[in-house]
Image (cartoon, rainbow, N blue to C red):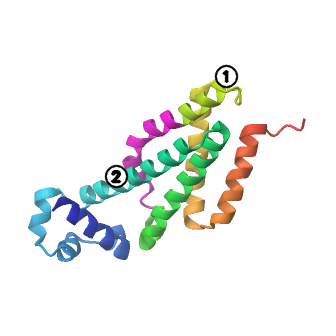
Amino acid sequence: MRNNILESAKAVFSKYGFKKTTLDDIAKAVGKGKSSLYYYFKNKEELFEEMMILEVEKMKNAFTSAVDAEKIPKQKLRTYILLRMELFVTLVSFYPTFRQEFAENWGYIERIRARYDAEELVIIKGILQSGIDSGEFAITDIELTSQAIIKAMKGFEFPWAVQHDSKEMGKDIDSLLDILFYGVVKR
């Protein structure tokens, strides 16, 4: 029943957005009374958070598989960043009305995502360490470099989510990776 509620909530949030969706709307979509939702969730925010956690888990599994399929560390990093950003944009695009609420809900989204920041740091550090081990990367501080990459990705999330163009995003990511890999100094 819990999964049924989450799936129905996903459709309702997608249609109306976070603000306009009510527990009555979700209960109606599930075919139950609103009181049955309270058995599983305290409120709309908790239900939404759980739904987002499941979506983020699906995304994380998708990009972990894609990164693991790559052999070259440089390509692993590119694949990770590109897929992460595409999946993030897809998630935001899936909820068209949520896109309009995106800016005002940013703090709420960040609180949900905070639990994945440490996991993301581990993934990036692993990719960088494999590049160091293979002699492809020359990094003196993996922790700082990993955090810089994550902060750069987060900095582009909002603009790319609001004005999504996959081709342009791919070009932007390639440009950013060129700067990361080769620097800005003319050699």
Report the residue marked by disc 2.
53
Chief secondary structure of the magenta portion = helix
Coordinates of residue 153 in the picture (x, y in percent): 58, 48
Outermost residue toward the right in this view: 187
Above or below: residue 164 compared with residue 182: below
Mark 2, other Cα within 10 Å: few <14 / some 14–19 / many ≥20: some
Q: Is 115 on the left-hand or right-hand side of 152? A: left
Magenta stretch in the rendered image: 104-123
Q: Amino acid at mark 1?
A: Thr
Report the residue marked by disc 1.
140
Coordinates of residue 54 in the picture (x, y in percent): 33, 54
Quadrant of the image containing the C terminus: top right
Badge 1 element? loop
**Quadrant in the rendering for residue 128:** top right
Q: Is 109 colored magenta in this rendering?
A: yes
* Distance of label 2 from label 1 (alpha carbons): 34 Å
Of callouts 2 and 1, which one flags the residue occurring earlier in the amino acid sequence?
2
Badge 2 element? helix
**Measuring 55% from the left and 44% from the top, which residue is drawn there?**
69
